[in-house]
Image (cartoon, rainbow, N blue to C red):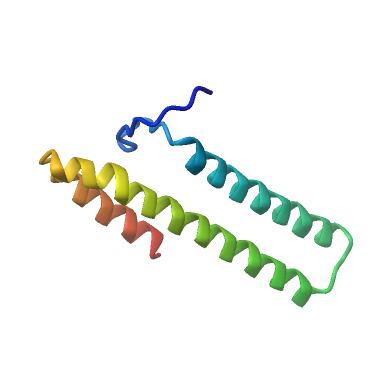
Amino acid sequence: MARNKESCCCHGGKTKEREEKEYKDLINRLNRIEGQIRGIKGMVEKDAYCPDILVQVAAANAALNSFNKVLLSNHIKTCVTRDIKEGKDETVDELVATLQKLMK
């Protein structure tokens, strides 16, 4: 996938080209989370003790929450800020709706 430094809106079915550094960071985080999930699956397959599995699930949840924080921060600093400067107030409503979904 070609990478460029252009910030495109990332909502409403649109896409966003991320800077290479942001892209690599997000992919690395997801790869680690994927490894954690595979590890949890292996623990279940090997009949590991429940509390040991639960601790690993908590760690995977924390990693996903951290991923969300980074992604949300990047979104606010790029898409949301740009849209507000351009007078696209509906972006704030979208951000509020997204935050409500994240806080369930």
The residue positioned 71% from the left and 67% from the top of the image is 56
Q: Is residue 74 left or right of residue 85?
A: right
The percent position of residue 67, horizontal first and vertical second, equals 51, 55
Q: In which quarter of the image is the C terminus?
A: bottom left
Kindly identify the residue that appears in the image at 44 percent across and 59 percent down: 69
Residue furthest toward the bottom?
51
Say how many tags the image has.
0
Residue 65, relative to residue 88: is it above or below?
below
Where residue 42 sits, quadrant-wise, is: bottom right
Side of 98 where 91 appears, left or right: left
Residue 100, above or below 3:
below
Camera-side residue of 91 and 102 = 91
Residue 98 x, y percent position in the rendering: 33, 53
Query: In the displayed image of the protein, which residue is found farthest to the left?
Result: 87
Extreme-top residue of the structure: 2
Residue at left 56%, top 41%? Answer: 24
